Image (cartoon, grey):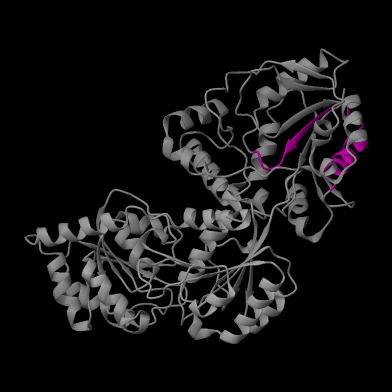
Amino acid sequence: MNILAVVGARLNSSRLPGKHLLSLAGQPMIHHIFQRLQQCQQINTRVLATTADTFNQPLVDWAHSHAVEVMAYSGNVDDLVGRIDTVVQQYNADYIVYICGDCPLIEPAFIDHALTQLIAHPQKDSIKLAPGTETIHEGIAVYSHHGWQKLVAISTSDLAREHVGYGNKLTPVLDALEIEDCADFSKIKHRISVDTDADYRFMSEIYRRWYQHHGESTIVSLSWVQQQLLIDPQLRQINAHVHQKLPNVKYRKAVILCQVGADVGMGHLRRSVLLANALMEQLSIGVQLHIIGESRALPWLQANLTQWHTDITEALTVLKELNADLWIVDLHPAFVPQQQLIDFCCTAKANQQRVIAIDKCDFLLPHIDLLFVPSFFCELAHPNLSFGWENYLFTPQTATKKNQLLVLTGGSDALKYGAWLAETIDACVPAEIERIWIQGPYAEAPQLPESSHWKKLQNPANLPTLVAESATIISCYGLSLFEAIASKALTILLPAKQLTSSNELRFLKQLQCCFICEHERDIAPILRQVFNAKDTDTKQQILDNAAALTANIDGVNIFCKKIQAMFNGS
């Protein structure tokens, strides 16, 4: 008897391209799926089914290098049923187990249990759980050969060909055997497939915890996962907000245009990435990210979701050929030809497409649906304008504070603090305080004293964690300043110079939520004040003010709700 397991996988996911080769505990996700299938006693053939195009060649290469049988389908790339059926016919399978390639927690015991039950009832076509049975399982379907043939025959529409099993929902023909689960997996419902960045972060944490205490030859226990979810609400929250895409829904497409560089820093890109993930996870909107600037390898940026451009003319030329329901523009007005961007927005509006601009693009207000300003301060008044403390586009993190000083001079250190600031810090800060200098991807290396007190980190992937755990933070004006304020750190703002307006700086000073250096000569006395053990009242008042002002930061969710309302016509 030939019992075949077919894993369907393509690297073209709209929400998380390349996901099957993303690492979990040092091995690609697809490796863990096949490792789990090796635990199944009933299965004797295991095949990876992908498509014969250049984008998916890395999957074929992985299979060849790991002695995994693979079939690259040359038919319609969206015809998943046809792809799986080709494997079924090639191997003349008696029973078929279809595995979705984004489910790295498939339960081997359940697969064996389902096959045993179905084989004992040869007249049945497939299996399903008995009525009322709740489970955490995802990504498994089991068929007899004649059941599979029935499914193929009635899978005639595009949707039925694209989603295994959907044809039977449209035209029920399968005589399914009702079975009990192999164990009690009903204690909690939670998403255990990987289709977004949040799903991947959740699964990475699951795998990290397991392999901290278990050997690499073991597989992650699904019962243990269920228990982890029951006892740890923070674990559940990592991807609790993700919505599953439905096969019968046509989802919208969005394009985000932003920029990076020595002149504009990294803030535009960082918040654009955050918005891209939120749109994909919360609204299931497919997002392309287009970046103007010199390309950099950034650990928090998914390369497959992005395209880099040398200037705005090149970017807009490419964008004009794309079809999108929503355009999001996050550019600095001083570094773009404004009329060119106005013309683009007018064309989009004429085509009944929605346009949103971020932050300082107020010159676009007459030509767009919304100007979303992630700032406490705005001097404009307009019905299509949204701003306020709650609009900041980051997610505040909490952590136990360490006795360390974090220095954030921006993605490019545009004001060249790296040339001299460290020496001033050493003259004013107690020796026992650890100092961490963050060098941005466009910044020159800072001149740091040869001292065990200093550590330099270049564009670290864990920057939000470092911000959350630092008791004191020195920052230039920008996104990092407000992340520092929201993290409940004593925050020192370096002289802002041309980075913000005098009115905005004056208003921030009135709020007393951070220490503000108006001139370079202010840095030393403010550092001494911050590290003066006796001056506790002033510092506590600043921390209290900061906590009150940043308590309701929820910019990402506010942004998504505004888009939802926009498309709903409200």
What segment is highlighted magenta in the picture? 79-103
Q: Horizontal and vertical percent for residue 400?
A: 28, 48
Quarter the N terminus occupies? top right
Query: As displayed, is residue 322 above or below residue 219?
Result: below
Residue at 13% over, 70% down: 528
Q: Horizontal and vertical percent for residue 328?
A: 58, 68
Q: Residue furthest left?
A: 534
Query: As displayed, is residue 513 above or below residue 41?
Result: below
Is 38 part of what is drawn in magenta?
no
Is 92 part of what is drawn in magenta?
yes
Residue at 50% over, 82% down: 333
Q: Quadrant of residue 495?
A: bottom left
Query: As displayed, is residue 529 above or below residue 264?
Result: above
Q: Nearer the viewer, residue 293 or 268?
A: 268
Residue at 60% over, 44% down: 243
User: Is 511 on the left-hand or right-hand side of 528?
Assistant: right
Q: Horizontal and vertical percent for residue 266?
A: 47, 72
Q: Quadrant of residue 469?
A: bottom left
Q: Nearer the viewer, residue 544 or 66?
A: 544
User: Is 384 on the left-hand or right-hand side of 75?
Assistant: left
Residue at 55% over, 62% down: 301
User: Is 52 on the left-hand or right-hand side of 197?
Assistant: right
